[in-house]
Amino acid sequence: MKDSKALKKDFPIFATKSVKKDGKELIYLDSASTTQKPESVITAITDYYKTSNANIHRGIYTLSEKATIQYEDVRKKTATFINAGTPEEIIFTRNTTEAINLLAYTFGEKHIKQDDEIIVSELEHHSNLVPWQEVVKRKKAKLKVIPIKSDYTPDMDEYHKILSPKTKLVAITSMSNVFGTKTPLKEIIEAAHKKNALVLVDGAQSAAHQKTDVQALNCDFFTMSSHKMLGPTGVGILYGKKELLADLPPFMFGGDMIKSVSQYDSEYADPPVKFEAGTPNIGGIMGFGAALDYINKIGFKTIEENDKKLFEYAVKKLSEIEGINLLIPPADKAGPVISFTLKDIHPHDIAAVLDQDNICIRAGHHCAQPLMEKLGIPATARISFHIYNTPEDIDKTCDSLKKAIKIFE
C-alpha cells in the first residue's frame, strides 16, 4: 500500500493513548460514516479561532475582512476541486442532508407540479430519498425508483423505461454507502437531459475517493460533506449551475442573505449568499479548506490506487472466512466499501466483538432501510476505508471475525 503507513502518522487520533483499548491500537474501518482528520485540518480550525476569529461579510475592520477573505478563498478552492464554472456556484451548508433538503424545498416547491415525476434508485441513503418522498406528497407528484440487479448495480434498462416527459428530476448517488457501487453517472445524466429533466448527484461517498468534474459530468446539482472528506463535521456543499441557482427562491431567511430590507418587504442577495442565511460554520469551513489541500497534496491517483488494492486484499482475506457473505458489486464498479453478513450472527454482535479488539466498523441498516427490505435482511456489517488504512488492519479484522464465530458457536 503506497504511503499508507506514513500517511497514518498525519492523523493524530491513531497516536492518541486514550483511544487504545487494553493496549490494542485503534483500527478505524468506518470512513463511509465519517473520516478521521489530519493534523493540518485540526490546526486550520484552531488557527482561525486564534488569529482570525470574526464574523464574515459584515465588519468594516481588518479582522473581519481577513476572515471574509479566508472564507471566500475556501469557496474558490471548492469550485476548483470539483471544477465548477465559478465560485458563485458553491453554497455552504451544514452537510449533504441539508444541501439536498435545500433543493427539495426550493426546487421542489417551485418546479414540481401535480403528476410530475422524480426518479431515485434503490441505492439511495435516506438523505436522498426522504426529502423527495415529502416533495411528492406535498405536490401530489410521483416517485419512481430504479431497481438494482443481483450484482448490486442499478438496472439501467429499467431506468430508461421509467424516464418520461413527466420526469422533472433524477436524484442519484454516485457511490452507494452500503455496497460501494459506483453508478454510471454519464449515462444517467445524458438520458435525463434528453427528457429535459435535471439531475442531482449525491456525491457524499465518492468526493474524497475519486476526482469529481461537475462540468464534464454536466450534472445540474452535486452535493458532498466535509466530514467524509477528511474535514470537520458541520460543513456541506451544494453545487448548482449558476442559472439554476438564480432561479430558485431562498431556503432560509435572515441576516446576510439580503440586499435590502424595509419594514414590510425584502430584496434578496444573489447566489450563493442568498442561500447562506445567518453566521455559517466559519471555523469548520477553514478546516474544510485544509482538507481539500491535504487531498490535493496526496492526489486522487494515490487514493484510488490504495482504495483498489485494499479492496482487492480485503475481498480475498474476507472470502477465506467460513460462512461469510460479501455484498459487493463487480470490482470495476466497486468503491472502498464492503458490506457482509457472517453466518447467523447479528451484525450488531459482530461489531461488538470487533470493538473488544478496538476495531471500528458499522453495523445496521446504514440509513438504507428500503434496501435492507429488498435484500430480506435487517442489517449488514460494513467496513469502509481511506488513505490511513493498511493490509494489517484487514488481517486483524479477519482474525477478530474468526473470534466472533467461535464465540457465537
Image (spheres, rainbow, N blue to C red):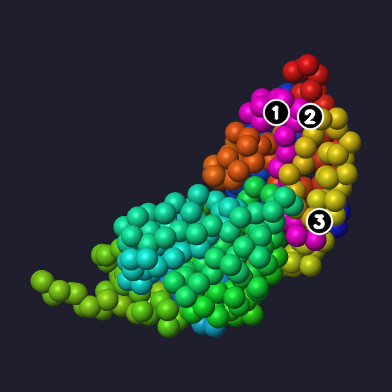
Query: CA–CA distance between discs 1 and 3?
Result: 25 Å
**Magenta-span inclusion, residue 335:** yes
| Circle on res. 287 | none
Q: Looking at the picture, does residue 337 appear above or below residue 77?
A: above
The outermost residue toward the left is 263
Q: Which quadrant would the N terminus be assigned to in this image?
A: bottom right
Comes first in the chain, label 1 or label 2? 1
User: Could you tell me how far apart the alpha carbons at marks 1 and 2 are, in whole angstroms?
Assistant: 7 Å
Region rendered in magenta: 332-356
Give the label on residue 331, or none. Answer: 3
Q: Residues within 10 Å of mark 3 (few under 14, many from 20)?
A: few
Residue for point 69% across, 53% down = 149
For the residues bearing labels 1 and 2, Cβ distance under 8 angstroms: yes
Residue type at mark 2 is Leu
* 42 relative to 357 in the view: left or right: left
Tell me which amino acid carries mark 1.
Ile
